[in-house]
Image: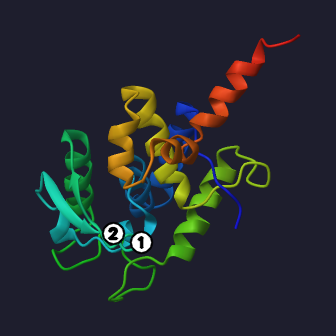
Amino acid sequence: MKKVEPIRDPKTIEAIKDYLYNWNPKYWMLWVIGTNTGLRISDILDLKVRDVKDADHTWVNEQKTTKVRRLYFNRQLKQALSEYIRENDLKDDDYLIPSQKKRSDKGMSREWAYTVLNTAASACGIDTDKYPIGTHTMRKTFGYWHYQRHHDVALLQSIFNHSAPSITLRYIGVNDDLVDQSLEDFFI
């Protein structure tokens, strides 16, 4: 598996979001949740409408860590979720991101989510051979931009359930950026 990086360009993030919305609103919702919560794909795909409908918070049992994470929905995310649920006539027991198959009792598959994100990235001009995109791209993009806005690695470490700040900085690609910046004007 190739290592994925966060998307650092806000215009690319918006282009992908627009592309996904025009393709299928559920793909847009996948992207919006992933880039605004930092949840892993397995946890996003497990969400049901009842978990998020009219809620300020929900609790997610993270599949990878088995830890319980309290998830906050800010005003913009609540509005996006509400509109998406209403416009798609989703019921409380429906998966938030349903499978492609009609009448399925499962959410979208991880493999299809990966395909969707790669298709959107390619369509938006990302060379996915040079800059691999995966479902983890959403989580890393969330982390990168959260850190850029708040510069609080301890808070982000807590959100991600990482054991050390250095892991969090490496995970979101900030270490690479800092090394590059430190070497840009360095010449002996």
Name the side, left or right, on which 139 lies relative to 59.
right
Name the side, left or right, on which 170 lies relative to 168.
right
Residue under the image location 42 percent in, 55 percent down:
28
Q: In this view, does 116 lie above or below 123?
A: below
Name the side, left or right, on which 111 lies relative to 103.
right
Residue 84 seen in the current view: yes
Name the side, left or right, on which 143 lies relative to 57.
right
Q: Which image quadrant for residue 126? A: top right
Q: Which image quadrant for residue 57? A: bottom left
Which residue corresponds to mark 2?
62
Residue under the image location 17 percent in, 75 percent down:
91
- Element on which disc 1 rests: loop
In the image, farthest residue toward the right: 188
Q: Where is residue 151 in the image (x, y as percent from the top left)?
A: 41, 27
101 vs 41, nearest the viewer: 41
Q: In the rendered view of the protein, which quadrant contains the N terminus?
A: bottom right
- The CA span between labels 1 and 2 is 6 Å
**Three-letter residue code for mark 1:** Lys
Q: Residues within 10 Å of mark 1 (few under 14, many from 20)?
A: few
Q: Position of residue 166 (x, y in %)?
A: 52, 42
Residue under the image location 44 percent in, 54 percent down:
31
18 vs 167, nearest the viewer: 167
- Element on which disc 2 rests: loop
Which residue corresponds to mark 1?
64
Q: Residues within 10 Å of mark 2 (few under 14, many from 20)?
A: some
